[in-house]
Image (tube, rainbow, N blue to C red):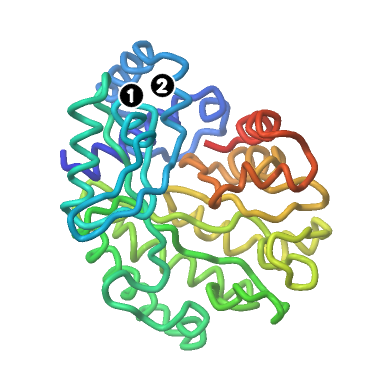
Amino acid sequence: MNRLSRTSSLLLALLSLSPLAQAQPKKAAPASTTDPKMKTFIDGLMAKMTQEEKIGQLNLVSVGFDVTGPVVSKDVDANIRKGLVGGVFNTYTPIAVRKLQEMAIKESRLHIPLMFGYDVIHGHRTIFPIPLGLSASWDLQAIEQSARIAAEESTADGLDWVFSPMVDIARDARWGRISEGGGEDPYLGSRIAEAMVRGYQGPGNDLTKPNTVMACLKHFALYGAAEAGRDYNTTDMSRQRMYNEYLPPYKAAIDAGVGSVMSSFNDINGTPATGNKWLMTDLLRRQWGFRGFVVTDYTAINEMVAHGVGNDAQVSAMALNAGID
């Protein structure tokens, strides 16, 4: 089994064995979660892990690098060796990835591999038009092909995971991030979401193939509907408008088999999305049957403090209890 397969299968299996995942309605699960050998392996691994290691595996750290390899601070270096880092953001190239991966699998107690994610938005080495420009083409085959090329290039560069597609419906041109999505139409946005997931994850979402990469649906949810087009602002919306106009592209990506979801910065009707149990558990997992994992947008947990819902410890607990992985 190659590096991508080991990493994604292990993480998906760990999450599928959580109480929350087991409480979900039964739907087609990733092969790794139904493999008896994998279940036995994961059960044994979980039994060996300390509470600190379990919490540590939830950490996604940002590590910069230069041409000679990753530039790792002392704390991150030590935490990788202690098994207290689950994934790395902003590091790619085979040299840089190998250095950190060997640190994790050779020097940590339980040898759990890292995942490597990056903001591959509209191409990796080959750059395509911005997503709003791609959507204006209405050429779904070309859009899917752009994601397929990005998957080929990013996996060759050591990446397991891309933070795309961004499928937020946006109808206020004052919102600067409107350029990252597919525009204002939920039908077109849904078809683009499906095409992008197919392009990244390949036919059948087979992440054991070395040239397929895990996609990440973002930003869940209603990020493009923030009041006055102000980034991170509140979103005040009825359920009717939410389900009819804003949620369809997210649902389309889930149905297409997207492997991961990213929570958004905004609040929804007074509750920050990253701490919103109705959104992350009731809707995403129980209603839609999502069985992948949820990552926050950059520092979204810390930024809930600015929403006035608690201190660092309180907002961390709020996020975990809401369904953030």
Please, what is the three-letter code of the amino acid marked with disc 1?
Lys
The image position of residue 183, as x and y in percent, is: 60, 78
> Taking 289 as reference, is 24 above or below it?
above
Point out the frontmost of discs 1 and 2: 1
Residue at the disc numbered 2 = 53
Name the residue beneath numbered marker 1.
82
User: Residue 28: percent from the left, percent from the top?
Assistant: 43, 40
Q: Are marks 1 and 2 in contact (CB under 8 Å)?
A: yes
Residue 57 position by quadrant: top left
Residue 211 to residue 97: above or below:
below
Q: Is residue 161 left or right of residue 191?
A: left
Mark 1–mark 2 distance (CA, rounded to whole Å)? 8 Å
Residue at the spot 64% in from the left edge and 38% down from the top edge: 281
Quick one: 143 or 59, which is closer to the camera?
Answer: 59
Query: Closest to the observer: 155 or 43?
Result: 155
Residue 2 rendering spot, x and y as whole percentages: 16, 42
